[in-house]
Structures are given as structure tokens and as C-alpha cells.
Amino acid sequence: MPGGKVTMWHAILMFGGKNKEIIYPNPGFPIYESVINYTGAKAVPMILEDKTDFNVDIENLKSLINKNTSLIILNSPSNPTGGLISKIDMDKIVEILDENPHVKILSDEIYSRIVYKGNEFTSLLSYPEIRDRLIVLDGWSKTYAMTGWRIGYSVWPTKYVKMSERLNINSFSCTNTATQYAAIAAIQGPQDCVDDMNQIFERRGEMISKELNSIDGFSCNSSKGAFYVLPSIKKTGLTSDQLQDFLLYQLGITTVSGKSFGEFGEGYLRISYANSEENIKEAISRIRNFLEDNKWENAKN
């Protein structure tokens, strides 16, 4: 596939539509909700909150499923939260799915190899009881830092492969050959670069969480995977959009409003640490310098 979005597009198109309901993480990758709404299906948010470390509320998930539920989307490790579904919780989720055989699953595992020490990634492919209705999304963009190459892949149950192929043929035709050779070189080549990158990300993640928690108005959970944190900024008194715009236009710091990741992202700000340690420290320094002479309410002006 030319990237990861195509798998989301195909799966949601196939199982969405009028009178269908699709459960998705919120805050979550914006394409989920966007495509669900496009198909005419009802977008049912699975709310993730910092007070539970952005873990899936198992009982709430169970209550969201009904006879109209056609698809559940899971993303672990998560963009934008940096959260990770534990093996214990994944077992419970699969038990729920086992009780609802009419529900298909899209597992977005694009950050599967960016997981930090003390945590373990669990792929839904490791549960044979749901493989006949499981679609897995993965690719090269995160693990090998190959975003610009636009190369991903998906794993489908045999019975849905022909439908997916038909959508491929009628949308993008094929993935370009040069990119495919680059992808082969990445997976067949040395993997120490992936491990080295993870160690750097982990160090940056620990640093940025610590630094943000020392800033008045911010409260930041530790990231378990991917390369994002989603600090709460509710105590600043600003909306997510207000703080995003102030940081960008006044302090020259690029972040993303939590609201961009869904209704329940309001009150949060996504910060990527796929940047140098020096630049991250500079960004934190600019915020601190502003707060030495101002309060957050002055950022509204």
C-alpha cells in the first residue's frame, strides 16, 4: 500500500455505511472519524483519558457494542496519546470480541516496534480466534523513518482480500516499484538502527514528560510507545486551539491541538518528540521564559 491511510480507507469503506456503527479511539488519528462519517456510518467514540493513562476502559468498550456495530478500530501504541494496550487488557478485549462474532476489527499497529522498556507490544494477530475478521495495518514509515516513501502493508482475512484488491485497482493502481525495493532493503538490512532510534526516542520521551510536568498548567503522562505525548493543558485556562496558535505564532513552537484528534482531545496538546533534544529543550525554554513575566491568560491576547 502507498502508506497506512489506504488500509483505513478500505476497511472503513467496506464495513461502514448507513445503519452501521464503528467504534474508534478518541482522541485518535483523525482519519478514523473522518472516513466513518464519510461512509454514513455512526462514529462511536471510545474515549481515552489521561486520568486512566489513556488506557481502554474495557467495560465501557463492552457497553458500546450492539447489533449495528460493524467494526472496531484499535491503535496501539497510540497516536496521539503515546499509550499502549497491555497484554492483560488485550486479552479482555479479545474476550469481548469473541462474544460478538459479527464485529470486524481494524488493528492499527504502525508503531508496533516503537515500544519502550518495561512495556510489551501485543499484536492482535497473536489471537487465532479472531483472525477470520481481523485487518492489521502496518508499514515502514515509523519503524524505519520512511514517511516520505509512502510504503505500508496490510494483512487481511482471505475472504476479504479480493474486495481489498478491487479497491486498490480502482483507487491507486499500485505502489511504485522503487519504494517497494527500498522497503525490502529496510527489512532485510541491519536492524540495529531501529533499536538505536528507540533508545533515543525513549530518552527524549522521558525528558519531555519531566520538563512539561514542571511547567505551570501542564500535566503530562509518560509515553509507552510511538513518539508523542499528550499533556493536559486544562489548568492553563486556554483551549487547545488557543494554546496551539499562541505557541506557534508567538513562540515559534509547533504542536497540534488535541481537538484535531477528536472532540475528547479538547484540553490536550499533542507534542511530537521526533525532533532533536536541543530543539526540544529550546522549546521548553521559550515557554518558561514567557511564563517568567506572564500568566497563561495573557496568551489569549
Image (tube, rainbow, N blue to C red):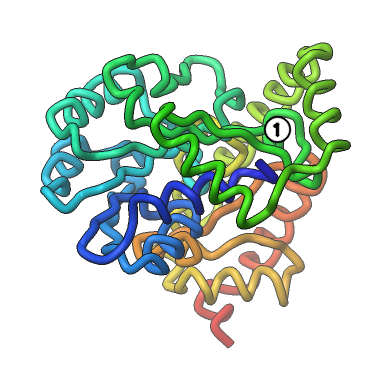
Which kind of residue does numbered mark 1 sit on? Answer: Trp
Q: Nearer the viewer, residue 77 or 24?
A: 24
User: Relative to residue 10, is residue 145 depicted above or below?
Assistant: above
Q: Secondary structure at mark 1?
A: loop
User: Relative to residue 160, is residue 8 depicted above or below?
Assistant: below
- Residue drawn at 51 percent across, 29 percent down: 155
Q: Is residue 205 left or right of residue 61?
A: right
User: Relative to residue 19, is residue 156 depicted above or below?
Assistant: above
Q: Position of residue 31 (x, y in %)?
A: 50, 58
Q: Nearer the viewer, residue 269 or 121?
A: 121
User: Relative to residue 194, is residue 100 depicted above or below?
Assistant: below
Residue at the extreme bottom of the image, as rendered: 301
Q: Is residue 196 left or right of residue 3?
A: right
Which picture quadrant has residue 263?
bottom left
Q: Is residue 214 visible?
A: no
Q: Position of residue 175 (x, y in %)?
A: 74, 42
Which picture quadrant has residue 275?
top right
Q: Position of residue 289 (x, y in %)?
A: 71, 63
The residue that label 1 is drawn on is 140
Q: Is residue 22 visible?
A: yes
Q: Nearer the viewer, residue 210 or 245?
A: 245
Which quadrant, please, contains the N terminus?
top right
Q: Position of residue 249 (x, y in %)?
A: 72, 76
Disc 1 packing (10 Å; few <14; some 14–19; many ≥20): many
- Residue drawn at 54 percent across, 51 percent down: 167
